[in-house]
Structures are given as structure tokens and as C-alpha cells.
Amino acid sequence: MTRRAVEREFERYLSQFVDETYAAFDVAAVLRGSNGSGSRVAGKLLNNSRPLERHVVRPKLQSYQQQILAQLEPVLDYAATDAAFDTYADEVLARDIYWNALRDTVRGDRRDRIRESLLARQQSFGDDLAPLVAADNDDFWTAVTDAYDQDRATDIVQTHFEFSVPLRENQNAFAFELTIDPGEVLGGLARALPTLDVEFTDEALRSMRRAEQQVIPSAKADVEQAYES
């Protein structure tokens, strides 16, 4: 089927995931967890969490969404050809949100293991997409039912819509951070306050897990409906 049809459906579920992550994200918890010289700034921002969510958190999540969609491109290139995955590995890794969030302190064998795990996850996604890309039908759900049986389609949803898996498996290996300019968020006298860098790795995992609990059952229901129709 056309690549655009696959991309469009993946983007639809990814958008749902990002929206649910945003809805679950507790920026106040992130600010309360900050300390050191930025605690005074964090205290001021705590009283204005809604503008902070709109001006900082939402754009950050949207940037991750675009990065995941960009990573899908070489994965689909792999799915559509007989080339070895190694041909696309560097490009896939360069667009991986987890690889780009890897802490500098993660080195040696552990770094290599995480690299291979991230690549294996994307190669598996490409392998699972290959029958769909090759399906002789441009209607997405007709192509799905032609390419897989229902159990296989459900397994693919469960496996590849759990976006939090790398973080769950190696949480302390990654650092997801926000840079907050109080002047941009609050305006006025806040322009005199220093920029604040805060880590939100724990909150990222919590909110992503909440999002998965909404999106995966919804996607599975779509799969079930496709095979019943």
C-alpha cells in the first residue's frame, strides 16, 4: 500500500498518544522536584503552571512527535526494500528520541547494549510493517486484514505503541529536560529571572504510561472492529 497511508494512520495514533501524555503531564510535580539556585524561579512558575504547559511542555512534546515521525521514514525505507537494516541504522539512531536523551555518563558496554536495543526495536517495527507496506490495497484497514491475522495485528499494536519501553527498561540511562525562560512564559518582571533547566524523566515515564493505557486499548478496539466488518 502507499507509504502515506501507513504514515497517516501511525501519525493519528501518535497524535493521540502525545495529547494523552500532555493531559497526564504534571508540570507542578516537575517544578517541585527542582532544587538548587533555580528553586526561587521554580516557585514563581508553580503559580503559573498553565502558561508553562502551553508555552514549554506542549511544544516539547510536539517536537518529540515530529522526531518520531521523522524516524519512521528510514524504518519504512527498510520495510519497503530487501536492504539490510544496517543500511539505515545510523539514520534511524540519529532520529531516536531516546538515543538523543542518553546521559553522557552512560558509556562502554552499557551504551553499546542500549544502542543495539534501540536499533533492534526499530528493526522489529520495520519487519512488522513490511507485509502491510507490500499489501495490494490502499485502504489502510483492508490492507491490515489482508496482511495479518487478528492476533498478529493486535500484537503489533501492543508492541509498537508502548513508546515508553526503552525508558522503563533503562530509566536512569536517559535525561529528558526542559529549558524554561520565565520571561517568555510570564512576561513582565519575570524577564529579569534566570533561565531554569529542569529534568522531567520520571514525569515523562509516568505520563507516557498513562497515555499508553488510553491509546493502546483504543487502537486494539479499532483492530477488532476491522476484523468484524
Image (tube, helix red, strand yellow):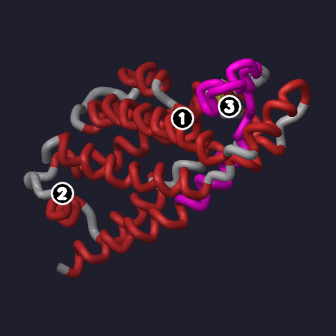
Badge 3 is on which residue?
177
Residue at mark 3 to residue at mark 1: CA–CA distance? 9 Å
**Residue drawn at point x = 48 percent, y = 21 percent:** 94
Of pointers 1 and 2, the one earlier in the residue sequence: 1
Q: Is residue 112 visible?
A: no
The residue under label 1 is which amino acid type?
Lys
The residue most toward the right is: 36
Residue at mark 1 to residue at mark 2: CA–CA distance? 30 Å
**Residue drawn at point x = 25 percent, y = 47 percent:** 8
**Residue drawn at point x = 14 percent, y = 43 percent:** 2
Q: Position of residue 161 (x, y in %)?
A: 46, 54
Of pointers 2 and 3, the one earlier in the residue sequence: 2
Nearest-to-viewer mark from 1 and 2: 1
Q: Which residues are magenta?
A: 183-211
Badge 2 is on which residue?
140
Q: Secondary structure at mark 3?
A: strand
